[in-house]
Amino acid sequence: MQGRSADELLPEIERGDEYCGRGGNQAARPHVLHVTIVSDDGYFRHESAIRRIGRESVLMLGGARALLMQAAHPLVAAGIVDHSAYGSDPWRRLARTMTALYTIVFGTRVEADRIGEIVRTVHHHVRGERDGRAYSAADPELMLWVHSTLVDTGLAMYETYVDAVEPALAEEFYEQMKTVATVFGAPPEIHPPTLADFRAYQREMLDGALRVGADATAIARSILEPPVPAALRPAVRGLVLANIGLLPEPLREQYGFSWGRARHALLAASSRSARHVFVPLLPKPLRLTQRVPLRVLAAFAKL
């Protein structure tokens, strides 16, 4: 499995093919796009914090928030603009990201490691230059910022739409997300030691390295005006508005998003409705991620 190019590996996600190990060993065939049954042979226990929080399908609706946070870093934004079809096909990029993340969280170690190999191979080829500064998707500092947006968005979405997260559970979730980042290729030593240290790192980034420029603005435009069928646009706009509301205030201001009392009250009301009525009443096949075939993501990406 060594030395294969990104062009060979990516179709395994795009087509939903199963990887066949050497010699056609069926036991070595992880279901890349169809992790519908939680594995007991994975990196995490069934009742681990990362699975308890990550299994709530509402977390998948925070993709726009995570992407806007990522794009606020000029070099991350440059990589997105230069190396993805974010403008014409944003849902496919999201589907690939979510497929990789949930395969690591809910799949077997074989599946997780396979996805990690794919991501690391792709990262090796994502490099370039912007305004005299070189960037690489394999840069540990950039990997840490991208990873931090997934951690922060996961907790924000859960607390907004599901329930409060006790400090011990949040700390465990943070620790286990470090394992996800390691599988993706981030060096373990790059992470802030505790969740409190992580929050301090985020504040430092908001005060310094993050700057919404032309690339981030272009990415934001693709989020605000996504190429979706007309019938879906009102729902997508409402979802995007909620994602904007959950952004850190300094980033909302940098992007130029207006956010007044009326919108704040609307987000608060939708949060209460989701936590007390909508989410508790959802059937398990819809509410829980591990019961939602990840092929749905791929199908959604093709709308």
Image (cartoon, grey):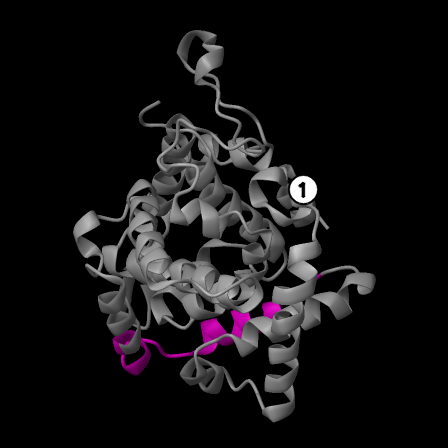
Tell me if residue 266 comes above or below residue 281 in the rendering. Answer: below
Q: How many marks?
A: 1
Residue 167 at least partly seen: yes
- The residue located at (52%, 63%) in the rendering is 163
94 sits to left or right of 74: right
Percent coordinates x, y for residue 301 in the rendering: 65, 48
Location of residue 152 (image quadrant)? bottom left
Q: Residue at the top extreme?
A: 23
Q: Disc 1 marks which amino acid?
A: Pro
- The residue located at (59%, 51%) in the rendering is 57
- The residue located at (64%, 66%) in the rendering is 276
Secondary structure mostly seen in the magenta stretch: helix
Location of residue 119 (image quadrant)? top left
Percent coordinates x, y for residue 77 in the rendering: 42, 66
288 sits to left or right of 41: right
Q: Is residue 218 magenta?
A: yes
Percent coordinates x, y for residue 124 in the rendering: 32, 44
Q: Which residue is mark 1?
A: 285
Tell me if residue 139 comes above or below residue 297 in the rendering. Answer: below
Q: Nearer the viewer, residue 224 or 33?
A: 33
Percent coordinates x, y for residue 213 in the rendering: 43, 78
Magenta-colored span:
204-227
Tell me if residue 300 comes above or below residue 248 in the rendering. Answer: above
Residue 136 at least partly seen: no
Q: Secondary structure at mark 1?
A: helix
Tell me if residue 158 comes above or below residue 224 in the rendering. Answer: above
234 sits to left or right of 143: right
Q: Residue at the bottom extreme?
A: 261
Q: Is residue 219 magenta?
A: yes
Location of residue 296 (image quadrant)? top right
Q: Nearer the viewer, residue 250 or 157?
A: 157
